[in-house]
Amino acid sequence: MALLELSNISYIVKDKSIISDVSLSVNQGDYITIVGPSGSGKSTFLKLCSDLISPTSGTITYNGRPLTAIDPESYRKEVGYCFQRPYLFAKTVRRNILFPYDIRGLEPDMSRIEYLFDLLHMPLNYMERRNDELSGGEMQRICLIRSLIFEPKVLLLDEVTSALDATNTSIVENVIDELHKKGITIISITHNEEQSLRTANRRISIVDGQLAKEEVLR
């Protein structure tokens, strides 16, 4: 049974088809890269996978259960999402990192937080920094830490290295590789041809909202 199954998914906005009749089975441990022209529907596809938006038609299941039957908060613990543009919605790093705990009324797991800061090569004292004191690469790493708080089984990445310099790109790529080795399923959008082939076991191309091609890489 597939971990995440998308069956004949379509997404229409104001009579415009953004995603059209896409089906994809994602297995536990897959590393799938998504490529395609700008505006082809890649980010919308990832938002559908994350349950941020719902398909106009078709079904999405997780572990055999329709997303419509799964509590959204439970699902978002299982599926982490990191956007192309780092989005920090509080004024300080601390508030951003603690936000996933706060909205669920949970005590922060500081050992988990310390582990993630170390994993992303960030000093723990960055918790005390304001957002406007961070570089773009640091902001992206904070967003990645936030998405990993609850040890997700699936990580959805929307061009997370596209705006980073070479040093930060290398750090983030290595962390993603390490997470995949630990068994996390990765679905990642990229415009970088080399990046799309480097470690993924599957690559799909989305063109004009349709699944145009699927390749098994290894």
Image: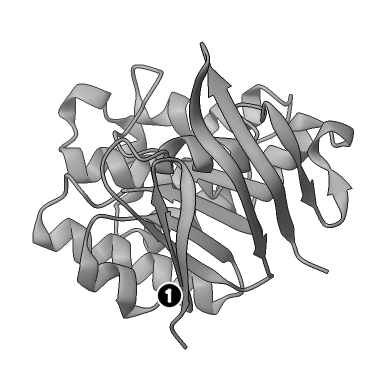
Q: Is residue 146 left or right of residue 26?
A: left
**Is 14 placed above or below 84 here?**
above
**Point 32% across, 39% down: residue:** 84
Q: Is residue 153 left or right of residue 136?
A: right
Residue 69: x and y, percent? 89, 35
144 or 29: which is nearer to us? 29
Residue 66: x and y, percent? 85, 42
Q: Is residue 36 visible?
A: yes
Q: Quadrant of the N terminus?
A: bottom right
For residue 183, what is the image quadrant? bottom right
Q: How many marks?
A: 1
**Is 210 placed above or below 106 here?**
below
Residue 156: x and y, percent? 50, 50
**Point 24% across, 55% down: residue:** 191
Q: Is residue 58 left or right of residue 119?
A: right
Residue 179: x and y, percent? 50, 69
**Point 51% across, 72% down: residue:** 180
Looking at the image, the residue that sits furthest to the top is: 14
Q: Is residue 35 left or right of residue 56?
A: left
Which residue corresponds to mark 1?
A: 200
**Is 18 placed above or below 122 here?**
above
**Point 62% across, 73% down: residue:** 29
60 or 118: which is nearer to us? 60
What SS does tag 1 mark? loop
Q: Amino acid at mark 1?
A: Ala
**Is 208 placed above or below 52 here?**
below
